[in-house]
Image (cartoon, rainbow, N blue to C red):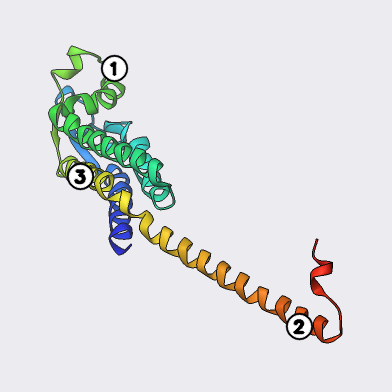
Amino acid sequence: MRNKWTLILAIAVLGGGSLIVGSQGWVQYDITQLGVDSEIGIGAVSGHNANPALSPVGIAALVAALVLAIAGSVFRRVLAVLIALLGAGIAYGGFSVMNDPIAAVRGTATELTGLSGDAVDTVILASTTVWPIVVIVAGVLIAILGIVALLVSGSWGAGDRKYASAAEKTRKTAGKKSAGPDRISDWDALSDGEDPTLSTP
């Protein structure tokens, strides 16, 4: 059971961490060469703005980890596969920004210059920070943990079955104890000269 909670906590922390990392500056840009004021022509775009899909995917991974803690055996496997896919999605989001940082700042550059498409792409100086790499690592780890959960979550029900068996034994013991007073009552009835079997339906 300890391994179960360690695994779930790790997925939740990584999913929540990807959301925090997404709020950091992922891509630094410089478009001052077009005559834009340096105070607004130099800046950074956050991960959530660079890749809008990062927020819902990160939230989904976090929620899936929490639901994994209470899900049944079959649903746990479905969630484990989903978590692995979400982790891959998070990693891909970081990779896509690193692969094309200009696309991440194109909208900001268009707002500041009035240019669009190829015209603005040729005047943007953009570079990624370390944060996309961090989120790639987090996504890969989430995907791996999702696969691990798929392989081991089938054994998590053992504890539940143990408690269910203990509860069943308790009920049987209680039933045996409740049968005691009935036999005593039968002896009392015989002592009084009555036949207890005559009252049995």
Residue at (21, 24) in percent of width and height: 103
Q: Amino acid at mark 2?
A: Trp
Relative to residue 49, is residue 171 depicted above or below? below
Residue under label 1, please give it.
Answer: 114
- C-alpha gap between disc 1 and disc 2: 101 Å
- C-alpha gap between disc 3 and disc 2: 68 Å
Q: Secondary structure at mark 2?
A: helix
Nearer to the camera, 73 or 148: 73
Mark in the foreground, 3 or 2: 2
Residue at (38, 48) in percent of width and height: 68
Any part of residue 142 in sight: yes
Relative to residue 115, is residue 99 depicted above or below? below
Is residue 147 shown left or right of residue 59?
Answer: left
Q: Label 1: few (<14), some or many (≥20) within 10 Å?
A: few
Residue under label 3, please give it.
Answer: 144
Q: Percent position (x, y) of residue 58?
A: 33, 41
Residue under label 2, please give it.
Answer: 187
- C-alpha gap between disc 3 and disc 1: 44 Å
Residue at (48, 61) in percent of width and height: 164
Q: Quadrant of the C terminus?
A: bottom right
Q: Amino acid at mark 1?
A: Gly
Q: Amino acid at mark 3?
A: Ile
Q: Percent position (x, y) of residue 42?
A: 20, 35
N-terminal of the pair, mark 3 or mark 1, is 1
